[in-house]
Image (cartoon, rainbow, N blue to C red):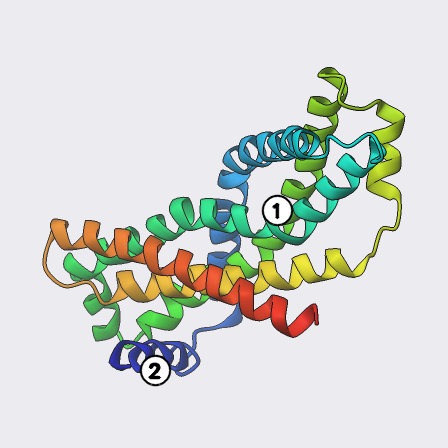
Amino acid sequence: MKAIGAYFIFLGSMFVRRETFSSYFKLTINECISIGWNSIIIVAITSTFMGAVTTVQTAYNLVSPLIQNYVVAQVTREMVVLELAPTITAIVIAGKVGSSIASGLGTMRITEQIDALEVMGINSSSYLVLPKIVAAMIMYPLLVIIAGFLSLYGGYIAGTMTGILTETEYIYGIRIDFNPYTVQFALIKSVVFAFLISSISAFQGFFTTGGALEVGQSSTSAVTKSCIAVLLADYILAELLLN
């Protein structure tokens, strides 16, 4: 409870004694490049194989002659859009971006750079953390869109090349009975996940004490807690928005 209270106090501290808009704009753009652009390759590789594996395993389980082949693509679409693209990508981003945020802020803390900002009258939590959270909430939904597209494309390649189903059957399967709300739900989850990963990682790094060993521990703790928070939020959002 003490840690949770400190976390919410930390979030509240970012909205007092703020800097000028231009300062935040420049910092946010830099963070967008660091969080979004630099994560595209790992997201692309993960999501493509994720879609391919989902298609192959779905076809393996749907072995009844009474089930049409296009159902494989339909099941793949629902799994990718509703769960795999936003959630698995969040776990990957927590490992890459979350650890980077925590270790960066932790290094600044133990080298007294954060203390120097405070001495100059700058709200260090707002100046250093708020742009990271805003950038994550902007870029992560875009990464989820890319992940969803590449997952479906990976499923298309795996399904057609292995002879599981034809190109026409796959396209028909991902189009039939499509509910646009699933995309909205995935984007809502992506915004929540981005906030949790960036804020929890920043919190862990910002209050690092000790030396280089503790920076590594903060980075590890940030990834672990971010993943737990993402999975918990995934369940809560599913209960609230899908029932």
In depth, the one of 141 and 223 nearer the eye is: 223
Q: Earlier in the sequence, mark 1 or mark 2?
A: 2
User: Which marked residue is nearer to the observer: mark 1 or mark 2?
Assistant: 1
Q: Is residue 1 left or right of residue 153?
A: left
- Residue at x 34% of width, y 82% of height: 9
- Assess disc 2: are there few (<14), some (14-19) or many (≥20) residues with their C-alpha within 10 Å of its C-alpha: few
Q: Amino acid at mark 1?
A: Ala
Badge 1 is on which residue? 85
Residue 212: percent from left, percent from top: 13, 49
Q: Is residue 134 visible?
A: no
Which label sits on residue 9?
A: 2
In depth, the one of 211 and 147 nearer the eye is: 147
Which image quadrant is residue 187 in?
bottom right
Q: Is residue 197 left or right of residue 145?
A: left
- Residue at x 38% of width, y 68% of height: 127
Which image quadrant is residue 16 in?
bottom left
Q: Is residue 156 left or right of residue 19?
A: right
Q: Residue furthest left?
A: 210
Q: Is residue 61 above or below residue 33?
A: above
- Assess disc 1: are there few (<14), some (14-19) or many (≥20) residues with their C-alpha within 10 Å of its C-alpha: many
Mark 2 secondary-structure assignment = helix
Residue 108: percent from left, percent from top: 23, 57
